[in-house]
Image (tube, rainbow, N blue to C red):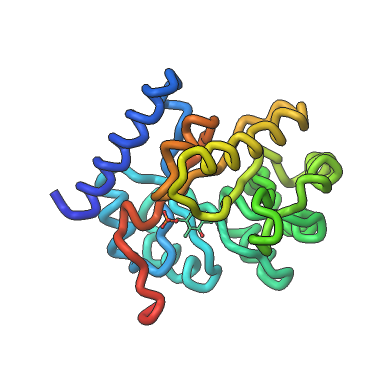
Amino acid sequence: MSTIAGNIAQVEARIRAAALAVQRDVTSIHLLAVSKTKPAAALREAYAAGVRDFGENYLQEARAKQVELADLPLCWHFIGPIQSNKTRDIAEHFAWVHSVDRLKIAQRLSDQRPADLPPLNICIQVNVSGEASKSGCNPADLPALAAAISGLPRLKLRGLMAIPEPTEDRAEQDAAFATVRTLQESLNMGLDTLSMGMSHDLESAIAQGATWVRIGTALFGARDYGQA
Ligand SMILES: *Cc1c(COP(=O)(O)O)cnc(C)c1O
């Protein structure tokens, strides 16, 4: 078994154990393999081990890998910060965007989503860490943003995404993810998606209702930005 295949098996075992611990159906929890800085060959290995969904943060890097891996039926998720001049490529080449935090970007993604593709799946990124985080919509602004996005014709609002400030303290992890779930429930819009949990905190995220866990390091090893 390759290292990546072994890592995938370990992460899947963690997901199953975390689901079992809170009596959740494991099929409601999806693995998003976060492949930023990793070469196309690593994604191909993950595909061979059964992974279909990949998350990328940098558009140019993602596009290069999409071209290299065009022979595989992969589902691409954009999870990084979005500048206005990148929305057209994102609207054309991804199935999901997890990192929408303002209406202007959502409006552009809807306008630019090609008519022959299904609506683009959207998560609104919320900031549950206050001053510690630069990205994500302020919880107070969430209801208005969610209402506006749900009215855009070429987008399908699916739920919320969050990247809480990293901590190894399980109680702090639980509190942050519970806040995200409560925000989603209080929208009362029937949203089915909570994109939360990374390599170090997926157990807590699953206990609090995550439906997508976004896992990089635990699948592909540490990232070397020096060579990226
Ligand atoms: C890099 C990244 C991840 C993966 O983080 P790991 O700690 O490597 O699992 C998840 N979500 C987002 C938005 C990221 O940028």
Q: Residue furthest top?
A: 23
Q: Does residue 191 show up? A: yes
> Which percent across, then down, holds residue 112?
73, 59
Residue 113 appears in the picture as rendered? no
Task: Choose between 43 and 224: the one closer to the eye.
Answer: 224
Q: Is residue 130 above or below residue 205?
A: below
Q: Residue at x 63, y 54 (%)?
A: 99
Which residue lies at the image location 56% right of the left edge and 42% below the top edge? Answer: 195
**Residue 94 sits above or below residue 19 on the image:** below
The percent coordinates of residue 153 (x first, y second) are 79, 44
Residue 88 vs residue 144, the one in the foreground: 144
| Coordinates of residue 209 in the picture (x, y in percent) | 54, 30
Is 13 rendered above or below residue 42? above
Which residue reaches farthest left? 1
Report the number of numbered marks.
0
Does residue 149 appear left or right of residue 74 in this picture? Answer: right
If the image is split into quadrants, where does the C terminus sit? bottom left
Q: Residue at x 34, y 29 (%)?
A: 16
Identify the residue at image location x=36%, y=53%. 72
The answer to which quarter of the image holds residue 121 is top right
Residue 6 x, y percent position in the rendering: 20, 47
Q: Front-most of 159 and 107?
A: 159
Q: In the visual, does 40 lie left or right of 48?
A: right
